[in-house]
Image: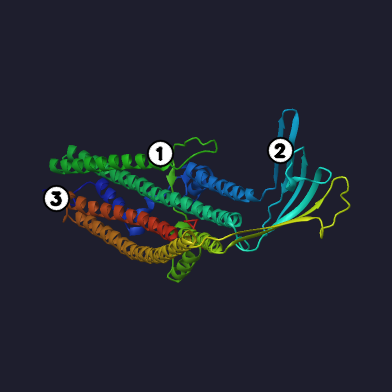
Amino acid sequence: MPRIHVCLPAALLVLMVLVMHQHTKAQSAMTPIFALSDSTPTLTLDQFYKIILQNHPVVRQAELLDDVAQQELRLARGSFDPKVVSSFDHKEFQDKTYYSKLDAYLAFPTWFPVNPKLGYQRATGDLVNNEDVISGGEQLYAGVAIPIGKGLFTDERRTAVRQAQAFTSITTAEQVKIINKILLEAAKTYWQWYYAYYQYRLSSQSVAIASEIFSRIKLNMQQGEAAMIDTIQAKITLQSRLVERQEAWLGFQNMGITLSNYMWNEQAEALQLGTAVAPVMTNGDQTFLSTELLQDLVMKAKENHPELVKLSLKLDQLEWERKLAREFLKPQLDLNYSMLSQPTAPHRVDPLNDYKIGLDFSFPIFLRKERSKVALTKLKIDNTQYQQKQSEREIVNEINTTFNELQNTIVILKQQQEVVELYDRLLKSELLNLENGESDLFKINIQQEKLLLSQSKLLKLTADLQKQKALLYWSAGIRNLNSQPD
C-alpha cells in the first residue's frame, strides 16, 4: 500500500498535528467526550432516584404495606372492643305466659386476664324455672371472669395483637426490601444508559476525525498529491465509523426507553426520556469505598438488612406462638363472680350476701393436640433460626465478594486508563512517523482503532464500577444506594 510521505500538503499535516494534539494524554483524550454544553439538559443518579421514590408505582405499592399492617393491627385489637350482648326469650301458649326472660350485658375485654361484665336481667311468667326466679322480677349485676389456669399469662387475643405489632415492623422491612430492589435495578439501567450515551459521543468524535481525514485526502487526490488507494482506505474507515455511530445511536435510544420505565409523574402518568438529556457523573458517584468501610457495611447488614430483620421478627412471632401453645398445656380453670342488686334499690348492694359465683374446669387427658402444637412451633423456630444463620452468612459473603469485585474493578480501571494513554502515545508516534514519511494511513487507522476500543472499554469499566457500587450498598441493605452509609 502506498505511503503518504512528507510531501503531503501543509493542510493535511496541520490536521495530523491537531489529531495528535487531541491525544496528548489519556485523560485529555476522553475530555471532549464528557464536555457537555451549558444548554444540554442533564439527569444525575440522585435526581433519577428522587423521581423513582416519589412517583414509581412499585414504590407507591410498597407504601401500601404500611396501611395493610395498620389494618392487621386494628383487626387484632378488635378482639378487645367492648361488646353489647342481649338475649330475649318469651313463650305464650293458650292465653298463658309461660315465661319472659331478658338478659342484656356489656362486656369489657381487657389486656389483663380480667374481663368485667355489667348487665341487666329480667324474668317473669307463670312457669319460670326456679333458678331463674328473681325477686321483684328485675336484677342488675356486675362481675368479672378471671382465668386462673390457661389464659392467665397469655391468650389468643393478646398473642394476635403482639404478632400484629411484629407484622407492622415486618412490612416496614419488606417495604425497604422492595424499594432497595427497584433502586438497584434502576441504578444498573442508569449506568447502562450512561455507557450508551458516551459511547455514542465517542463514536461521533471518531466519525468527525475520519470524515475530516477523508475530505483532506480526497482533495489531495484531486490535486494529484495522494493515491487513489489512500482515498479508498479513508472512505472505508469513514464508513466503518458511521456504522459504529449508528449502532451506538440505536443503543443509546433503546437504553433511554428502558430508563423511562422508571419515570412517572405525580399523576401516575408515564414519562418519556428525550434523547437530548444526558447522564452525568457527580463527585458522589466518583467516591469509591475504602477498605475501612467494609466491616461497617457488614455490621450494618447484620443489624438492619431487611431480610434479617424480617427473620428476626418472624422468630418473635413464633416465640409468642410457642408461649400460647404452652399455655394450652394448663387446665382450663375460670372463676366467675358477679355482685347482684335490684334496679328499685341499687344502693342496697351487699357483695358478701348477694352474689353469684361459678368455676369452670376442663382438662384433656392425653394432651396430644396441645403437645403436638408445642412441638410443631419449636420445629418452626428451629427452621427459622437455621434460615437466619444461612441468610446472614450469604449476605456477609455477598458483601465481601461484591467489595472484592469493586476493588478489582478499580485496579483494572486504572490499568485500562494506562492502556488508553499508551495507545494514545502509539498513535502520536505513528503520526510523527507519517510526518517523516515512515508510516501510512493503514497503520494510522489501526492505532486509532485500538485507541477507540480501549476508550470504549474504559467507558464500560466506569459504568460497571458504578453498578458494582450500587450492588454493594444493596447487598448491605442500605436504602440510599448512592450515598455512604450512616
- Which residue corresponds to mark 1? 275
Q: Nearer the viewer, mark 3 or mark 2?
A: 2
- Which residue corresponds to mark 3? 3
Callout 3 environment at 10 Å: few (<14), some (14 to 19), or many (20+)?
A: some
Q: Secondary structure at mark 2?
A: strand
Quarter location, residue 386:
bottom left
Q: Can the viewer see residue 470?
A: yes
Q: Residue 376: x percent and y percent? A: 44, 61
Q: Residue 123: x percent and y percent? A: 77, 41
Q: Residue at x 47, y 60 (%)?
A: 373
Mark 1 to mark 3: distance in Å? 42 Å
Q: Secondary structure at mark 3?
A: loop
Q: Residue 374: x percent and y percent? A: 48, 63
Could you tell me the amino acid type at mark 3?
A: Arg
Q: Residue 317: x percent and y percent? A: 52, 59
Could you tell me the amino acid type at mark 1?
A: Thr
Side of 151 relative to 428 (left or right): right
- Asked if the residue at tag 3 contacts the one at tag 1, i.e. Cβ–Cβ closer than 8 Å, the answer is no
* Near-viewer residue (474 or 252): 474
Q: Earlier in the sequence, mark 3 or mark 2?
A: 3
Q: Earlier in the sequence, mark 1 or mark 3?
A: 3
Q: Secondary structure at mark 1?
A: loop
Mark 2 to mark 1: distance in Å? 77 Å
- Which residue corresponds to mark 2? 88
Could you tell me the amino acid type at mark 2?
A: Phe
Q: Is residue 248 above or below residue 483?
A: above
Q: Residue at x 77, y 44 (%)?
A: 121
Q: Which mark is residue 397?
A: none
Side of 429 relative to 183 (left or right): left
* Near-viewer residue (350 or 41): 350
Mark 3 to mark 2: distance in Å? 115 Å
Q: Give the colouring mode of the picture.
A: rainbow
